[in-house]
Image (tube, rainbow, N blue to C red):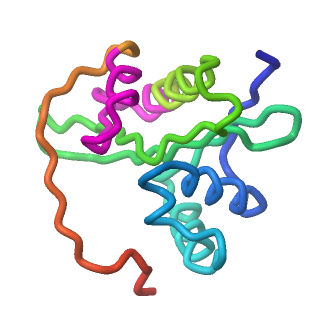
Amino acid sequence: MDEIIFRSATIDDLPALVAMLADDALGSVRESTDDLSPYRAAFAEIDNDPRQELVVAERHGAVVGTAQLSILPGLARRGSVRAQIEAVRVDRPLRGNGLGAQLIEECIRRAREYGCALVQLTSHGSRTDAHRFYGKLGFEPSHVGFKLTLTDGATSS
């Protein structure tokens, strides 16, 4: 695979990021590329928070992968800081070529720079291929997750 550059996302990357979020069975129901205004508001909030980072993978000037890295301070584990990886996506034509592994490895590298003791992620129960992928990267299934939907997904700000 050609050289991949990892960097923090910019607002100019937003259309590509939303398109990747919408490009699967779950995302096609949850996301909308028609109106980017709620995504712009969310991007601004993430971009202004020093404990949040939208990581992008760039190839030949195009965004081809993304993940959100959140740094979470906590009391558990003797006050350890942990990293949460969310919304991992790779552009459809590049899936299965190792880019996803590189993206996760980049997130882990950045988590170490933040001083994190643990990296965690969640994956929807229906994403069995993703579960195998994360297992191959050394992640172990350890918890059962629960969610309670409070809104229809639109931001309130």
Please indicate whether residue 84 sits to the left or right of residue 5 in the image.
left
Q: Is residue 119 magenta?
A: yes
Residue at screen point 70% across, 33% down: 93
Up the image or down, 4 lies above or below 36; here it is: above
Which of the two residues, 130 or 74, is positioned nearer the viewer here? 130
Q: Is residue 78 above or below residue 148?
A: above
What percent of the width, then of the height, locates residue 9?
67, 51
Please tell me which residue is depicted at 32% across the width and 38% down the height of the picture.
Answer: 121
**Residue at the front extreme?**
25
Q: Which residues are magenta?
A: 110-135
Q: Residue at x 17, y 38 (%)?
A: 79
Question: Residue 19: percent from the left, percent from the top?
Answer: 65, 57
- Residue 148's quadrant in the figure? bottom left
- Quarter of the image for residue 14 reads bottom right
Give the residue displayed 46% in from the left and 51% down from the top: 25
| Image spot of residue 114 (x, y percent) | 44, 35
**Residue ranking furthest to the right:** 60
Q: Is residue 90 left or right of residue 62?
A: left
